[in-house]
Image (tube, rainbow, N blue to C red):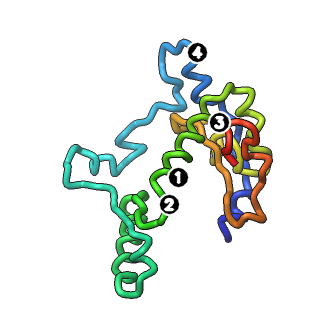
Amino acid sequence: MSTAASLTLKSSIPVPSVKELVSQPLDTVPHRYLRNIDADYPTATLFSGDSSLHVPVIDLIKLTDPQFQQSELQNLDNACKNWGIFQLVGHGVSHESIKSMDGKIKEFFDRPPEEKKRYAQKPGSLEGYGQAFVISEDQKLEWCDMILLKAIPTDTRKLEFWPEQSPHKFR
């Protein structure tokens, strides 16, 4: 199944925005956000403070270079299987572009709740503002808000989820 197809197969159960939750006085963290570190994250011991444990770095240039491709594919396979995360370098995106994109995303999340809700996920889609992959009322949730936007292929972009006016030049 393609990633593009999987983005429209299921929708998430709507949940409150984390930013809205913290704007209200809270005596305790809501139970859906509390985690038992041993039960929920069995590999958490990897982060015991051992400075020799670093997130794997994958070089996109090496992935496309026949001389290094096999070893870098092995590094990628290891990162996915054993870490579930990696840092990608050699992608050619300038530091300025990344910094600008980060700023635009922060501007979006600083917008008032009613404005962000204009870009909310719709039934049957994971694209848009909200939490994705919420499938039950008792499911543990991440302490974050998100916006999922498909950028490529360009002909499948759903611009109704891309803020038009603010932040300036977000699209």
The foreground one among 168 and 69 is 168
Query: What type is the residue that disc 2 sits on?
Result: Val
Sequence-wise, the earlier of marks 2 and 4 is: 4
Q: Residues within 10 Å of mark 3 (few under 14, many from 20)?
A: few
- Decide: is 21 above or below 83: above
Q: Viewer-proximal residue, 88 or 52?
A: 88
Give the labeled residue for mark 1: 97
Distance from disc 2 to disc 4, alpha carbons, whole Å, reads 38 Å
- SS for dot 3: loop
Q: Nearer the viewer, mark 2 or mark 4?
A: 2
Label 1, secondary structure: give it.
helix
List x then y, in percent, for residue 25. Answer: 54, 12
Q: What is the spatial separation of the Cα atoms under label 3 and label 4, in whole angstroms?
A: 22 Å
Mark 4, Cα crowd under 10 Å, few <14 / some 14-19 / many 20+, is: few
Q: Which of the marked residues, 2 or 3, is nearer the chain's N terminus?
A: 2
Q: Give me the residue at 75% from left, 46% from top.
A: 161
Q: CA distance from mark 2 to mark 3?
A: 39 Å
Q: From the top left corner, tell me how far across and down residue 142 is, in percent.
A: 52, 38
Q: Residue 93 got which mark?
A: 2
The answer to whether 32 is drawn above or below residue 123 in the figure is above
Closest to the observer, 80 or 105:
105
Disc ID at residue 137: 3
| Residue located 42% across and 57% down the image | 85
Left or right of 4, for residue 47:
left
Q: Are marks 1 and 2 in contact (CB under 8 Å)?
A: yes
**In this figure, which residue is indicated by the disc labeled 4?**
24
